[in-house]
Image (tube, rainbow, N blue to C red):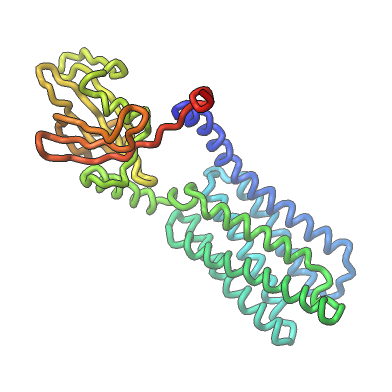
Amino acid sequence: MEKARITTDPVLRRIKSSTPFLLALALVISGFYELYKLYVSDQTDNFGFVDDILAAVIKIIMAEFILFDPKRNVLRAVGFYAMSIGMSRVILSISTLMVVSTISLVIGSITLIMGVNLLFSSYKYLMDTSRGLLSMIASTSGLALLEVVILLVNYQTYLMTGVPLYADVAPNIISLFLYLILLLILDTEEARYNTELQQINTRVESVRVMNVAENSLKLSREDGLVLKHMFDDRSSWNTLSDGGPVESEKRLVLVDERVKSVMILQKWSGHDNIYVTMSNDKRGSVMIANRFSITDVYSDGDDNDFTSLRMYDGKRMLMCLEVEPFIPSRKEATA
């Protein structure tokens, strides 16, 4: 389990660090493709030609903001990316509304409303607030759904009349692709839980987890074995010789969904109990902590089969922890 965690952590960090570059690349490709289409087109509508150029240029400029932002991170990259989409949608919706037809009125109005909402949400997201997240998901989903409807109507019109509603659907497909990228990024934990307000919420949640024993608390199997044998095997513990009462110490990590807490186990000289400090800081800060002692620990099976641990202080049960299931190695599985 530990080896798998060590192997995947660098991969996850590499993916997170490359997210801003991927978003910038998507905007650059989209912007230059739109400029190329305008260059080879015979468009005569001056206003439509200008706003198409402006929308494409905005994407390229926002891509530069993502790449050269001194505070570059996933959150700010998502904000700039969403802002480019919102601004381009607002510009293109104006030219759509200028076409006198019911379809143009409906499509232009929806695009304008969603674009303005997405633009405002991206600004709030850049300011590190949580309001922008849900609003951006709603706006982006609405715009993506609109593009799907346009593509379906265009295809149905072609089947019925032999003449498509729009001769060139490439811009709609590109827009749909940009929306889907944004939705995928917004659904990651990096985007959902790294705003300032969400970090505060996580911190408050970690304080609750430290003081309320719930079944949702989980422990890795390696740490579960350490906890299971803390009275008869402390070979993996760190020996302390700083003149204090603590002979040895071991730190374990408990997880409740996205919230992690640290369980510090200590064996004191002259005491049979194991003393525990629950901290919400991986460094073991005791500024916000909960302390108690353990006299007994019971499992629901042997070392390979147990899935939970119950800890007691005398006759009082302190907590019940879920342990990750045992996964046999390839050699053990084929034996």
Q: Residue furthest front?
A: 335
Q: In the figure, 194 relative to 333: above or below? A: below
Name the one closer to the observer, 275 or 52. Answer: 275
Q: Is residue 273 left or right of residue 67?
A: left
Q: Quadrant of residue 80?
A: bottom right
Name the one closer to the observer, 293 or 222. Answer: 222
Name the one closer to the observer, 97 or 103. Answer: 103
The percent coordinates of residue 164 (x first, y second) are 82, 76
Q: Residue at x 17, y 26 (%)?
A: 274
Instruction: Pick the quarter of the image with the N terminus.
Output: top left
The percent coordinates of residue 83 (x first, y second) are 59, 60
Q: Quadrant of residue 105?
A: bottom right
Q: Is residue 125 left or right of residue 240?
A: right
Q: Residue at x 20, y 22 (%)?
A: 231
Q: Residue at x 66, y 58 (%)?
A: 178
The percent coordinates of residue 8 (x first, y second) are 53, 33
Q: Residue at x 71, y 77 (%)?
A: 96
Q: Is residue 318 left or right of residue 43?
A: left
